Image (cartoon, rainbow, N blue to C red):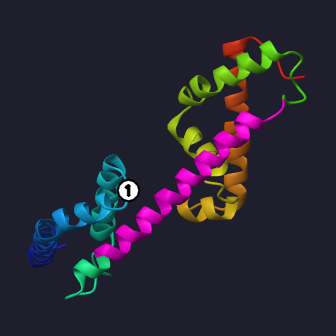
Amino acid sequence: MDIAEVMGVEAAERRDRDWFIDLYHDNYRILLAYARRRVDEQTADEVVSETLLVAWRRRDEVPEGYERAWLFGVARNTILTAARSARRLSLLRSKMRGATAPAWADSSTEVSDRAGALLPALRGLREADREILMLVAWEEMSHAEIGEAMGISPNAVAIRVHRARKRLEDRITALTGHFEA
């Protein structure tokens, strides 16, 4: 790369950075107010952060002159996604409260031990294992959807899910001393 190309890259990076700083200053407070009128404070902060991250990543797609409208569209979609996730989590919790003991459980003590070990075991997994299990269980995404999000094939997702489930089961067994029948 010659000096002219390097200078061109630096100028483009500076232009992108300046564009984003202006976008941030012009829209942050308005986006935050919009989000806080729709969701709780913590979620609103996350929505605005995610919206600005999407703007940075997709800066070439943001329509000139309509930046604010585009940001509101991204924020709206982010809020809708957060609401769907919250509903799924609520449904999962309801299902878990009403669930009957699994076939592998010999006693209510064993079920209680294994249920109590689930979150510590999940926290003890590698981030990649935890993420893929949560996408399947909590976000209810298909292997194809996860593959698209992660940039891998659905078959690779299936293999990773299988291995992550096995590691989770091993951690639960190690924490409780109860073995699956």
Q: Residue 110, can we see it?
A: yes
Residue 138 seen anywhere in this rendered image of the structure:
no
* Residue that appears at 36% across and 50% down: 40
Which residue lies at the image location 36% right of the left edge and 76% below the top edge?
Answer: 73
Q: Residue 31 at what x, y percent from top left?
A: 24, 66
Name the residue nearer the viewer: 47 or 91: 91
- Residue at 15% across / 75% down in the picture? 12
Q: Nearer the viewer, residue 104 or 84?
A: 84
User: Who is closer to the viewer here, 107 or 41?
Assistant: 41
Q: Is residue 133 above or below residue 173?
A: below
What's drawn in magenta, residue-wise? 71-100
Is residue 61 shown above or below 79? below
Q: For numbered disc 1, what is the local secondary structure? A: loop
**Residue 69, how many percent across, how many down?**
28, 81
User: How far from the left and from the top, in percent, is residue 7?
Assistant: 9, 74
Left or right, residue 80 beside residue 72: right
Residue 28, picture quadrant: bottom left
Three-letter amino acid code of the residue under disc 1: Val
Give residue 2's position: percent from left, percent from top. 14, 74
Q: Residue pushed farthest front?
A: 37
Quarter of the figure that contains the C terminus: top right
Q: Which residue is mark 1?
A: 39
Q: What is the quadrant of residue 53 in the picture?
A: bottom left
* Dominant SS in magenta: helix
Name the residue rendered at 71%, 37% in the picture. 96
Q: Is residue 99 magenta?
A: yes
22 left or right of 141 in image: left
